[in-house]
Amino acid sequence: MALAFLLGRIVLGLYWLETAYNHIFKSADRVGYSQSKGMSAGTAKFAVMGTGILALIGAISLILGIYPTIGIICLFTFLLGVSFKMHAYWNVQDAGAKMSDRINFQKNIALAAALLALLAVSQPWVYSL
């Protein structure tokens, strides 16, 4: 079970590492998307970079098992902000866009629930630095 937990942490952490990379180094698309959701250019750039940093901290924390509570809080914060602002499907009129936002919202809520479940795992985690 310890190896399964480690593998799960690494896979989940890699997901968040890719998210962080895209937010930090490929931010233009995300800034544009944020603006399409009603954010000003300055606010969108700050939000994309800020969420990228949260994702990076969380990814490193999950993969290495370093301060997992802090990493989980960072990722949970990321998900709350992004889910309710960027994927508010209940405000979308276009059927295709509504479905896409609903799927992303539900995915984010499931990820948030999984992160909360990780808080129940005793610390320090096995195979942690």
Image: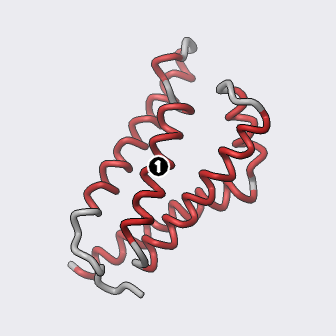
The answer to whether 6 is drawn above or below residue 15 in the figure is below
- Which of the 4 image quarters holds residue 119? bottom left
Instruction: Name the foreground residue: 109 vs 73.
Output: 73
Where in the figure is residue 83, as x and y percent of width and height?
48, 37
Quadrant of the drawing holding the N terminus: bottom left
Residue ID at (66%, 61%): 21
Q: Label 1, secondary structure: give it.
A: helix
Q: How is the image coloured?
A: secondary structure
Where in the figure is residue 104, as x and y percent of width and height?
48, 37
Quadrant of the drawing holding the C terminus: bottom left
Q: Residue furthest top?
A: 93
| Horizontal side, residue 42 vs residue 13: left or right | right
Residue ID at (55%, 21%): 96
Q: On the image, numbered disc 1 is attached to which residue?
A: 77
- Which of the 4 image quarters holds residue 106? top left
- Which of the 4 image quarters holds residue 24? bottom right
* Dot 1 crowding, Cα within 10 Å, few <14, some 14–19, many 20+: some
Residue ID at (75%, 54%): 26
| Horizontal side, residue 47 vs residue 82: left or right | right
Identify residue type, mark 1.
Thr
Residue ID at (62%, 60%): 53
Where in the figure is residue 29, as x and y percent of width and height?
74, 42
Where in the figure is residue 31, as x and y percent of width and height?
73, 40
